[in-house]
Amino acid sequence: MLVYAVFGDPVEHSLSPAMQNAAFSALGLSARYLAFRVRRERLRDAILGAEAMHFGGLNLTIPHKEAALSIVEPDENAAAMGAVNAVAFVDGSIRGYNTDGLGAVRALEGAGVRVDGRRVLIIGAGGAGKAIARQLALSGAQVAIANRDRRRAIELAAAVGGRGYGLSDLSKLVPEAEVVVNATSVGMRGGDPRLFDGRLLREGQTVFDIVYNRKTELLKDAARAGAVAIDGVPMLVWQGALSIEIWTGRKAPTDVMEEAVREELRNR
Ligand code: NAP
């Protein structure tokens, strides 16, 4: 039996074990996926230990995605995004990948949203914002990035060929966008203040909130405005599915995985 794992800190609320074990079981693979709390300063030991013990592969989550860059051999995509969220052990080498950006694009496509040539506003320039901005730009979107720390938005925009703004520009940017992506952590906790007035949204827009632990106020505002509202679960599923494809070469059962995640969320 092969062991797979997610390393994070904290990690006890991770949905990945339920999701990935459902996938392995549907694929008929003899594999088990576990969550390990790994402290920041022990990440190297943990990755090397997993390699020594012939783990099948790893996912990395907060706070390890950036630090892993100097431990594994990142592919071009992960190096450009500045973060690794999937690790594979191949013939003695430890390879790093980033499946968050493509996971986001697959989530949008799965909801019937084309990104090529569309005006996309990404709010957030942290780890997830960087991966999504790069992938959307590669997929042909016209990208605008707004971030609380405006400097980070401008730097990211310069790297991916978009425009960078502060959050005070949202009242102008939101109505202009065809697709609005929340890639900040705002909305994870009930009671988080809104990033912008929901009345700026309208029918015909798509709102994609990558927060996946609850139905956010942003998604409620989007539904109220008649916009298409997509939560963070499909992206979570796709980043995990793409990880399985890297590790096993098999196409992952995204419908089974999504059901496992939604079931886990219902039971919390
Ligand atoms: P991160 O690297 O820590 O970045 C956090 C981002 O949120 C930054 O842009 C930060 O702005 C912004 N932010 C934090 N608090 C804010 C506030 N009060 N007001 C305005 N902006 C604020 O985190 P991350 O890894 O990018 O994750 C961000 C969110 O995405 C989390 O909720 C995470 O769970 C979710 N996520 C979902 C998936 C999925 O598969 N669905 C995958 C990855 C992440 P500053 O730069 O100004 O600090």
Image (cartoon, rainbow, N blue to C red):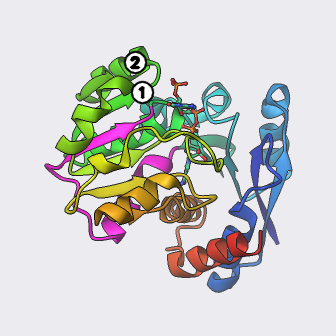
Count of number-bearing discs: 2
Q: Residues within 10 Å of mark 1 (few under 14, many from 20)?
A: many
Task: Assign a secondary structure to mark 1.
Answer: strand
The residue where tag 2 is placed is 150
Numbered disc 2: secondary structure: helix
The answer to whether the residues at label 1 and label 2 have Cβ atoms under 8 Å apart is yes
Residue range highlighted in magenta: 98-124
- Provide residue 126's location: percent of width, then percent of height: 51, 31
User: What's the residue at 59%, 67% (across, down)?
Assistant: 248
Q: CA distance from mark 1 to mark 2?
A: 5 Å
Q: Where is residue 42 shown, x and y percent of the image?
A: 85, 30
x, y percent for residue 8: 76, 43
Depth order, front residue of 54/84: 84
Q: Please say whether residue 90 is visible from this viewpoint.
A: no
Q: Amino acid at mark 1?
A: Asn
Q: Residue furthest top?
A: 151
Residue behind mark 1 = 147
Q: Is residue 12 left or right of residue 248?
A: right
